[in-house]
Image: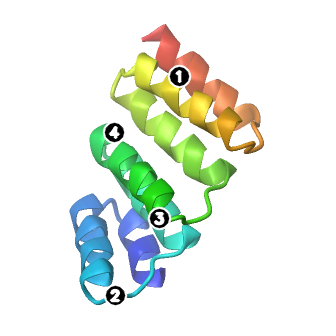
Amino acid sequence: SAAISACEKSAEWERALQLMHMMTQSRVEANTVAFNAAISACEKNGRWGNALQLLNAMAHGKVQTDTVTFNAAISACEKGREWERALQVLSSMVQNEVELDTVTFSGLVGACER
């Protein structure tokens, strides 16, 4: 998780994805923190598709999601001008009973404005 967080902070989205892949190959379970950092790395670099793939991987792997997870995915959609996908993420957030906050709504408004 620490290495992926470092990738997030340095905008190394490709390296973050490589580390996530290596964890999977090594049968090391990625936790919420690792996924959130990887999603945020993708978000910071406009890689909304990769961010949504990671969000889906969390669901399939039964990894706990949280507000940070969904907000990063919504923000990635916002940056990619994918407002419909941002609304789909919101729908998943509500279905999973994850708390919405001002960051959630700010990202959604930004996505719909573009």
Earlier residue among tags 4 and 1 = 4
Is 90 or 80 nearer to us in this picture?
90
What element does badge 3 sit on? helix
Q: What residue type is labelled 2?
A: Arg
Q: What element carries label 2?
A: loop
Q: Is residue 46 visible?
A: no
Please state, as top left, top right, bottom left or bottom right, where the C terminus lies in the image: top left
Q: Where is residue 53 in the image (x, y as percent from the top left)?
A: 33, 49
Q: Distance between the residues labelled 4 and 3?
A: 14 Å
| Residue occupying image coordinates x 34% and y 87% | 27
Q: Work out whether residue 6 or residue 71 is closer to the camera in this orientation and state it.
A: 71
Gap in angstroms between the C-alphas marked 4 and 1: 13 Å
- Closer mark to the observer between disc 2 and disc 4: 2
Query: Mark 3 or mark 1: which comes first in sequence?
Result: 3
The colour mode here is: rainbow
Disc 4, SS: helix
Q: Judge the density around disc 1: few (<14), some (14-19), many (≥20) Cα neighbours within 10 Å.
A: some
- Note whether residue 57 is visible: yes
Q: What element carries label 1?
A: helix
Q: What residue type is labelled 1?
A: Leu
Q: Position of residue 37 (x, y in %)?
A: 47, 64
Label drawn at residue 87: 1
Labels 2 and 4: the sequence-earlier one:
2
Callout 4 amino acid: Trp
In the picture provided, is 14 more to the left or to the right than 110? left
Spot the residue most to the top.
113
